[in-house]
Image (tube, grey):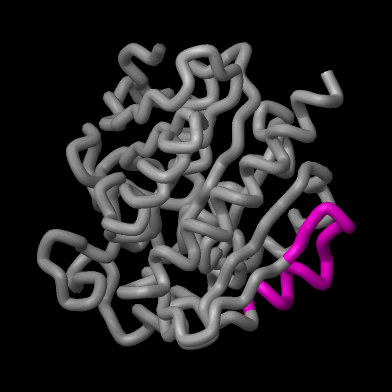
Amino acid sequence: MVGEIRNVHGENLDYAFHEGDSESKSVVVLGHGVTGNKDRPFIVELAKALAATGIPALRFSFSGNGASEGKFIDSTISKEVDDLGAVLGVLEGYAVCYVGHSMGGAVGVLRAGSDSRIQLLVSLAGMVHTRAFAQREFGDVTPDAGFMWDDPDCPLSQAYMDDLGEIDSVVSSASRITVPWLLVHGDEDDVVPIGDSHDILTESNDSAQLITLDGADHVFSDESTSIMVQEVVAWIKTRFSNLTAQR
């Protein structure tokens, strides 16, 4: 269904496509968080579960991450918003649900607030207060010299810190999202606090709802994976059915 995907910089974006029902005109796009890639275990499990119910799924790595072209040090939320636009560009004619984890959740909020090609939105432990995240996690690291979480494969750039600071928070974008929107967050997330989801939910339209998972961490480890997958697949399946009925 999908051929090569290149962003506005000409960088090839690595992806995996899960077929689902070949007659389906719906697809779920899955985006990862900072330092992640399309092969995070819970993202793979979610994609497989969606395909098993007949819903095609496409998981991809943002530029500079995983096997996608580009440099990690050039990765920012703003660049990833453009990457997501490139993915949407090859899915013309399909109803699209975007599922974004962590920083990928912020990417989804920013894109969905201005791009009608996203018809359903899911935020998994979505980052909301970007400036606060940058200071909390990397405030003691020297940009362009140090690394994210001491990982030499993930250099911390000044461009990344500046971008998160300039965005500050995606709360203001919440009111522009009018499509059905599911937020899922664990109450033991020590990377993006669940308060981020509560804050953006307060400013969102009636189309949004929050599911809190007891004991779940930032990456939905262990038994939290299956619980998250079950909740998300059920929600997407119902909302896609509603969209089909409205056509």
Left or right: where 185 falls relative to 154: right
**Pick the front one: 37 or 220:** 220
Is 181 situated above or below 214? above
Q: In x, y percent, where is residue 33?
A: 39, 58
Tell me if residue 219 can be seen: yes
Which residue, as the protein is rendered here, is positioned at the far left? 152
Is 231 above or below relative to 38? below
Closer to us: 19 or 81: 19
Q: Where is residue 103 in the image (x, y as percent from the top left)?
A: 47, 59
Number of numbered discs visible in the structure rendering: 0
Residue 129, above or below 108? below
Q: Which residue appears at 56% of the width and 72% of the height? A: 185
Depicted 138 relative to depicted 34: above or below: below
Q: Name the quarter where the N terminus is drawn.
A: top left
Q: Residue at x 31, y 74 (%)?
A: 222
Q: Quadrant of residue 190?
A: bottom left
126 displayed left or right of 61: right
Query: In the rendering, at what x and y percent does residue 49 appear?
Result: 42, 45
User: Residue 159 colored magenta?
Assistant: no
Whether residue 110 is visible to the viewer of this picture, yes or no, is: no
Between 180 and 105, which is closer to the camera in this rendering? 180
Question: Is 199 inside the magenta-drawn segment?
Answer: yes
Q: Is residue 240 left or right of residue 184?
A: right
Whether residue 12 sits left or right of residue 200 in the image: it is: left
Give me the residue at 83% from left, 53% from top: 207
Quick one: quadrant of the C terminus? top right
Q: Identify the magenta region.
A: 196-209
From the top left corner, tell me how far across and down residue 230 is, in percent.
51, 58
Q: Quadrant of residue 194?
A: bottom right
| Residue located at (38% from left, 83% from top) | 139
